[in-house]
């Protein structure tokens, strides 16, 4: 078998095999690039309202807190503490409750896993470890192989010796410029 044919076969087969991974990592990468604008892993819901608290804070307990919150929200306070004199911080199954004792203002924040994005970010962050690390390393080496074999597929004026060389150079310049501008 000729080298060019072997090159095409390697490029084609690795591209097919890792197509799903490329899509998963790309979508996750876009989501993570915008982490300052949204949380790709969780939907965060916030709710604010007021309740009447007893003037004697020693009478506050989880039962009372749940009675006060019951009409406004469906969360249940499991435990609480006082981070400072004016605040009460409660913990719920999927979030937190903060109560300003002087005003009775209640802020409830609940978290819900964002479907699809939480799963692909789990893979992208390599939270699983174990065999996933080895698979991710193989994927990274395969991306390099796909790129190199792709560079060698086209011959002539659009190949790596002419137009391809210009495009590769332009593609390398962008990360170099970003490093010069932003890496301190």
Image (cartoon, grey):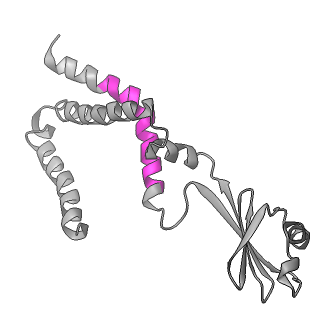
Q: Quadrant of the N terminus?
A: top left
- Position of residue 141 relative to residue 181, above or below, is above
| Prevailing SS of the magenta stretch | helix
Residue 160 placed where, x, y %?
A: 12, 38
Residue 148 lies left or right of residue 109; in this view the side is left
Q: Position of residue 180 (x, y in %)?
A: 18, 66
| Above or below for 148 versus 49 | above
Give the residue furthest to the front: 58
Q: Position of residue 132 (x, y in %)?
A: 44, 33
- Side of 155 relative to 103 (left or right): left
Q: Which residues are magenta?
A: 12-31
Picture coordinates of residue 123, whole percent (x, y):
48, 41
Q: Residue at x 16, y 31 (%)?
A: 152
Residue at image position (85%, 75%) is 60
The reply to whether the magenta stretch includes residue 15 is yes
Residue drawn where x is 61% and y is 56% of the image: 42
- Vertical placement of residue 141 versus 120, above or below: above
Q: Residue furthest left?
A: 161
The verdict on residue 146 being magenta is: no
Tell me which residue sits at (12%, 45%) in the image: 165
Question: Which residue is at the front of the view, 19 or 135?
Answer: 135
Q: Quadrant of residue 116?
A: top right
The residue lying furthest to the top in this view is: 1
């Amino acid at each position: 078998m000729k080298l060019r044919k072997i090159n095409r076969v390697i490029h084609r087969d690795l591209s097919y095999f890792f197509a799903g991974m490329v899509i998963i990592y790309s979508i996750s990468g876009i989501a993570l690039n915008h982490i300052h604008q949204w949380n790709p892993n969780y939907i965060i819901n916030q709710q604010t309202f007021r309740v009447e608290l007893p003037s004697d804070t020693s009478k506050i307990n989880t039962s009372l807190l749940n009675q006060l919150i019951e009409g406004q929200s469906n969360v249940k306070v499991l435990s609480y503490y006082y981070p400072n004199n004016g605040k009460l911080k409660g913990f719920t199954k999927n979030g937190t409750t903060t109560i300003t004792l002087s005003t009775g203002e209640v802020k409830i924040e609940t978290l819900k896993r964002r479907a699809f994005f939480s799963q692909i970010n789990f893979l992208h962050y390599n939270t699983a470890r174990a065999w996933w690390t080895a698979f991710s390393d193989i994927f990274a080496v395969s991306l390099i192989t796909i790129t190199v074999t792709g560079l060698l597929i086209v011959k002539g004026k659009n190949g790596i010796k002419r137009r391809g060389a210009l495009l590769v150079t332009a593609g390398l310049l962008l990360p170099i410029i970003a490093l010069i501008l932003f890496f301190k």
